[in-house]
Image (cartoon, rainbow, N blue to C red):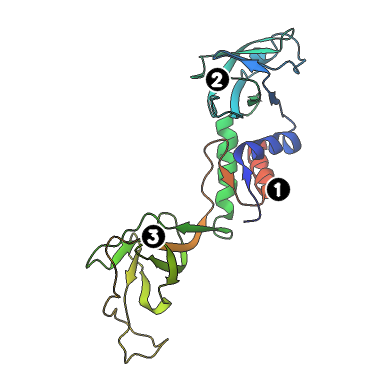
Amino acid sequence: MLYNTTLAQLIERMLKVSLHGWVGGTATSGSTTTTVDTARDEPDDTFQNTSPQSRIHITSTTDGKAPVDEDRLVSDFANGTGTLTSTPAFTVATEAGDKYLLTTEYPWVEMVEAINIAIDSLAPFNLIDQVDETSLTLQSEVYEYPVPDHMVYIYRITQSDDNGKFFDPVPPHEWAILHTNPPKIKLLKLPNWMPDRHWAGDLFAPVSIIAGNTLRVEGFIPQPHLVKAQDICHLNPNYIVYYAASLLHA
């Protein structure tokens, strides 16, 4: 994974570089209805008079208590104190150190949708690593298991030992992917007389499995859609930002 860019960082870069509309900052104090930023110097009433009316979106916090990902209308701005008043009230108070974004032209939801369209355009070509070692619990006499959600390619499967540790992978010829809908992992074993790498059209006797153990499945998934401000994108942020900006300009 070469990139680890949050949704909030993608939107910030897009607004600063591509759309030239970045309006954001860091709160110095706040409440459930106000976000105070003493560094703001716009005239009084600037943000409630934009068209469309500006909205404030809290994107990150230092203490885990801020109303992150909540979006509110800006109903007033007072230059003298740097106070942004929002309505309706946030569920919890904003505090010093909380980062916020003011959307003055493109709503947050539109920018997120444009970014996810850009992500979809790369989905067939840029897969990211995924390891699932919790969702598949082995059952006695059960040899078919669903492929973990969103996984489009699998290269290694390992059965846990009695201590929940993963050591020796299941040999490649002892499992196969059934192209059903949805696809499944089939545990199998070639008979002793069958030479390695010999093609066979039928599945053979299942491998020995230990009920209660889990399977660790390693493979690749497409980049998931981003929803929350701190969701991570592993794709090239430059491509995502410019592609999304071109959609918004259009």
| Quadrant of the frame with the C terminus | top right
- Amino acid carrying mark 2 in the image: Arg
- On the picture, is 123 further left or further right than 12? left
Q: Position of residue 162 (x, y in %)?
A: 34, 63
Q: CA distance from mark 3 to mark 2?
A: 46 Å
- Amino acid carrying mark 1 in the image: Asn
- Residue at 56% x, 12% y is 33
Q: Residue furthest left?
A: 141
- Disc assigned to residue 164: 3
Q: Residues within 10 Å of mark 3 (few under 14, many from 20)?
A: few
Check disc 3 and report its element: helix, strand or loop.
loop
- On the picture, is 25 further left or further right than 136? right
Residue that badge 2 annotates: 72
Q: Position of residue 74 (x, y in %)?
A: 60, 15
| Quadrant of the frame with the N terminus | bottom right
Residue that badge 1 annotates: 238
Check disc 2 and report its element: helix, strand or loop.
strand
Tell me how many marks there are.
3
111 and 5: which is toward the camera:
5
- Residue at 55% x, 17% y is 93
Q: Of circles 3 and 1, which is in front?
A: 3
Image quadrant assignment for residue 195: bottom left
Sequence-earlier tag: 3 or 1:
3
Q: CA distance from mark 3 to mark 1?
A: 41 Å
Q: Position of residue 29 (x, y in %)?
A: 65, 16
In the rendered image of this protein, does residue 75 appear above or below residue 114? above
Check disc 1 and report its element: helix, strand or loop.
helix
Q: Residues within 10 Å of mark 1 (few under 14, many from 20)?
A: few
- On the picture, is 82 further left or further right than 205? right
